[in-house]
Amino acid sequence: ELKVEQNPLFLSMQEGKNYTIYCNYSTTSDRLYWYRQDPGKSLESLFVLLSNGAVKQEGRLMASLDTKARLSTLHITAAVHDLSATYFCAVGYSGGGADGLTFGKGTHLIIQP
Amino acid sequence: DSGVTQTPKHLITATGQRVTLRCSPRSGDLSVYWYQQSLDQGLQFLIQYYNGEERAKGNILERFSAQQFPDLHSELNLSSLELGDSALYFCASSVAAGGPKNTEAFFGQGTRLTVV
């Protein structure tokens, strides 16, 4: 059974600081996703990582994937209040043409002025 | 706006009842997924349909069922509802059914189900 663990689950940080969210998964996967969710809202796709060593950046967020370590990171640079949200990593698996995502529990990020 | 449409947005019903949630995928997407989000269980994959056929099952209860119609919209049927079924139910869609390419899933706004 594929398991996805995120840490930390809760993170309160100040504006302007840097921090990293970690996502570990238990079995081989060919893709990893990062999503953002604002309270009571839908999930917004941030990054899709498809290969070992993949690195993607959008604004103050950068995601990377190490498939050998089964680890992805989401790095926040010079955080701003607007980045406050819950961030999920999700791991996809391919088997028999099926690919439901397994989500981590999410990291609830609060960025304080 | 992801292009995935879910109705209704909110639903309040009594225990023991049956409800149907509806999802229209993005134009061109053949795969539809249903997810349940609750405080207890987090985000859980329920079921996937691809071009009208069931493709994968996750943690879906026997009281729940789904189908995808020829126009590719999907419905999730929840019956004999219990208090614990209260959750946010998301539908997502993607172009393909499996493999790493074209499987980025786009989520709808969700249906918040409250069972009283």
Image: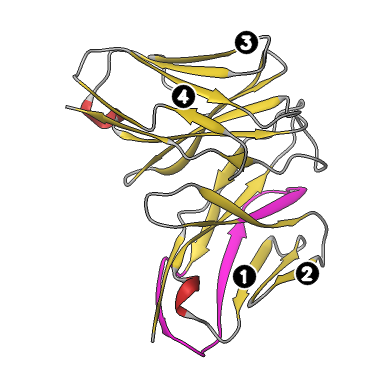
Q: Which quadrant: the C terminus of chain A?
A: bottom left
- Asked if the residues shown at circle 4 and circle 2 are in contact, with their CB atoms under 8 angstroms apart, the answer is no
Co-location on one chain, circles 4 and 1: no
Disc 3/disc 4 C-alpha distance (Å): 19 Å
Magenta includes A13? yes
Q: Is residue B87 above or below residue A59?
A: above
Q: Which residues are magenta?
A: A8-34
Image position of A108 (left or right of A65): left
Quarter of the image with the N terminus of chain A is top right
Could you tell me the amino acid type at mark 3? Answer: Phe
**In the image, what residue type sits under mark 2?**
Val
Q: Quadrant of residue B86?
A: top left
For marks 4 and 2, give the CA distance: 34 Å
Q: Label 4 is found on which chain of the structure?
A: B
Whole-number angstrom distance, CA of label 1 to CA of label 2: 10 Å
- A89 and A15: which is toward the camera: A15
Mark 3 or 4: the one toward you: 3
Please give left or right for residue A26 compared with residue B87 in the image.
Answer: right
The residue shown at (75%, 36%) is A94
Residue that label 3 marks: B69
Circle 4 sits on which residue? B60
Give whichever of discs 1 and 2 has the lower sequence position: 2
Q: Secondary structure at mark 1?
A: strand
C-alpha span from label 2 to label 3: 38 Å
Amino acid carrying mark 1 in the image = Leu
